[in-house]
Amino acid sequence: MKIRLYHARILTMEEGREIFQGEIHIQDGQILYVGEASPQENGEGKSPERPVKWDREVDCEGNLLMPGFKDAHTHSGMTLLRSYADDLPLDEWLNHKIFPVEAKMSGEDIYELSKLAVLEYLTSGITAVFDMYLTPETIADAFDKMGMRCVQVGAVNNFSQSPAMVEEMYQKLNGKSPLQSYILGFHAEYTCSKELLEKMAALAHKYKAPVFTHLAETEQEVAGCVERYGMTPLAFLDSLGMFDYGGGGYHCVHMSGEDIAIMRDKGLYAVTNPGSNTKLASGIAPITDFLKEGVRVAIGTDGPASNNALDMFREMFLVTGLAKLREKDASAVDAMEVLKMATVNGAHAMGLKNADVLAPGKAADIIMIDLNQPNMQPLNNIAKNLVYSGSKQNVIMTMINGRILYEKGNFNTKEQPWEIYGKAEQIRKKIMG
Amino acid sequence: MKIRLYHARILTMEEGREIFQGEIHIQDGQILYVGEASPQENGEGKSPERPVKWDREVDCEGNLLMPGFKDAHTHSGMTLLRSYADDLPLDEWLNHKIFPVEAKMSGEDIYELSKLAVLEYLTSGITAVFDMYLTPETIADAFDKMGMRCVQVGAVNNFSQSPAMVEEMYQKLNGKSPLQSYILGFHAEYTCSKELLEKMAALAHKYKAPVFTHLAETEQEVAGCVERYGMTPLAFLDSLGMFDYGGGGYHCVHMSGEDIAIMRDKGLYAVTNPGSNTKLASGIAPITDFLKEGVRVAIGTDGPASNNALDMFREMFLVTGLAKLREKDASAVDAMEVLKMATVNGAHAMGLKNADVLAPGKAADIIMIDLNQPNMQPLNNIAKNLVYSGSKQNVIMTMINGRILYEKGNFNTKEQPWEIYGKAEQIRKKIMG
């Protein structure tokens, strides 16, 4: 499959490279060429032999091509719980609404509900997600069926999964298909016994592998850990050797100076989830402190029960907006920094080194942004337009691994939306009554 | 022009009325009938004589009809400044970037730039705006040309406009056309001399009319007024008799308990602008305190220099999200309350009593929300879906005064988007170089 995207503006997200006008050539899921309209042997990638027989040529009409967004923390199967339990105190939300419904969900349900999430990711230009949920195998099947890239992470806690199962999935899902991978992880310090955490740290050492977990999402979580172990969650986990091979935390809202130093020293990723932290009143993460210390920040939507949208544009505005509010400084966290978090940093956190920027040899995970919409005009600054006035509405193409899965409002997935909506609604009726 | 919208879900926004399935009939800009599919003489509006010769019948395919959003504070002409000066400290932003550009804008420029804003409002389901900017007559012409409803408000300060000009516009623009109106107002306490403010208060008394102004947007603004007059801006303005016939404030971020009591006692509207207050690091408005005291809250985007989007979905999420963060309470400000602010309260603040809810005799300012998109599935709760996962992408029809101006991504305005974009870009090149 050879595709040519031409008459485009291109934001490769390579460090220091400005937006330029040109084209991108794709073959078999990989980027062959990124450069000007008349490709030369210029180190940008070899000029393809002409004439090339393209399977498809797309006139981008001056619109913007850029790397797809990486949603670096989500629970896709929770689409079932969207708008089911909002405007409630956190405890009531979790214990009386979320947990009882989750207890009724089967692997087959999660398979269907994850496909619904995939449709939504595609509309928002998200080309890969970092998913933590209950049934890794059916989740991998769902993403494979839809043609979407998914990095799963272990979700073990005292009540579900086990270190043995995490290890099994680590072996089974890595290499299972070109689009699926799996990273070691556990739910959170406060839902895992010390014994369980020690087993996870042992796994990290066995595989010399990074570990991810929910971290310092709420004040209560941090206070609970300090009471249990006399340390913050990150200091405690680090004392077990959990992060000796890297990894990171989701949320990272309530972080001490010492915590941030650990993040820096171990090269951990802080995956921020501002939509969820806002809606659940958890607080505002110290993004400017992370940046000051050189801690790499990635961005996730969290699941649809707590956000409730899977919309990277909302998250990007919130990352910088909430930092500005927190620091009382309108200059906090520049728009380009936010774009880097939403693309390059997310890819690196998820182990997707090959899906970070647009360059020859990289995976063809590419989105097209419609600049011919009123919220993108005039063109004072395209990068700032993206972060401050951009919307899902501007996403007019989402390509994953060289396949165009979403284009101008239409899904080119194997299963059609109405089928997926129908199944989700059936599951809702079955479980919620 | 007779239009029938059928096979719809309908959210009328009448107090206590649930979403139901039915249809809406429209004639000459007015709603004739709202009710079930086989209309009866049931007080909902008279059943139209059958067979009726419809000019157009729209199958809504189960999607949602609701009143259009009211953007209760904006500066439409500032589209020119979108993404021109972001990520800067507030002072530098205003004095070194915004003011110098504004000094170069002509009335004709503002006419063109306001049309660009109208296109964006339509994509977000906004059917009326409360606009404060420099050249009221060319602004009214722009909105009339586009077919959009606009309530302008006086913007007088020490440097531009005058009480005499505000009075002239008040007489000239009210009644000029069915879509345009004008309300007394001034820029802000901190940009107006006491003498000027006394003249505005006299106008309010002369016309027994409400007055609106920027109010308590920043801490510095409040501190400055306390230093000048020994009172908060609201207490000072109220002491001049400014609000003896009602009105309200834009922003209302830094409000004392006494301020909120004045709002309540005078029946003033608090128009909140959370996107702008976030991006400019101004703070979080005390929405829950307003609600507790019975102060009516409406929602505005503010202008594209400070937000930068004109997107009511972003604002709705932020109104409740930031309240949740401020109060550390995930149950703060229910979604239905937010929808009321964005529709009914906005209309009432703007003096549009006839464009608040969907009912017979009301203006046909109606939007259709696509529920057949992944972010709206499953249908646990449509109102919460709108506020927590809704997006501009879900707006598939915007009707103003009985005319469908935007439909499934296409504009039915007299002027086409590419012409408007072209003119805005020309102005940008002329002014910014």
Image: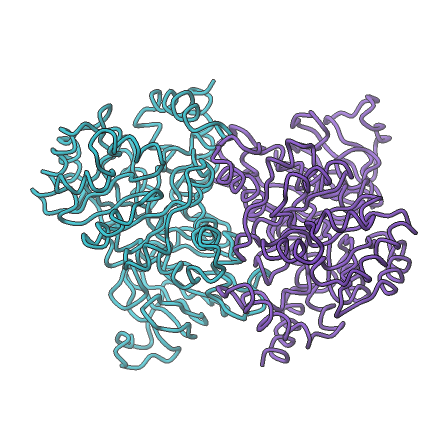
Chain colours: A purple, B cyan
Q: Position of residue B206 (x, y in %)?
A: 7, 42
Image quadrant containing the N terminus of chain B: bottom left
Query: Observer-nearest residue: A130 or A193?
Result: A193
The one of B292 and A103 positioned closer to us in this rendering:
B292
Locate residue A410, reporting x and y percent.
Answer: 64, 55
Q: In the displayed structure, does residue A53 sit left or right of residue B122? A: right
The image quadrant that residue A175 belongs to is: bottom right
Q: Is residue A328 visible?
A: yes
Q: Is residue B86 above or below residue A351?
A: above
**Residue most extreme to the left:** B206
Instruction: Name the residue: 57% across, 59% down.
Output: A308
State whether residue A402 appears in this view. Answer: no
Left or right: B358 in relation to A148: left
Q: How many marks?
A: 0
Q: Quadrant of residue B302?
A: top left
In this view, B6 is above or below A43: below
Horizontal and vertical percent for residue A272? 63, 46
Q: Residue at x 38, y 20 (%)?
A: B100
Measuring from the top left, give residue A129's x and y in whole percent.
Answer: 72, 52
Q: Is residue A14 above or below residue B368?
A: above
Going 12% across and 42% down the picture, which residue do you hit? Answer: B241
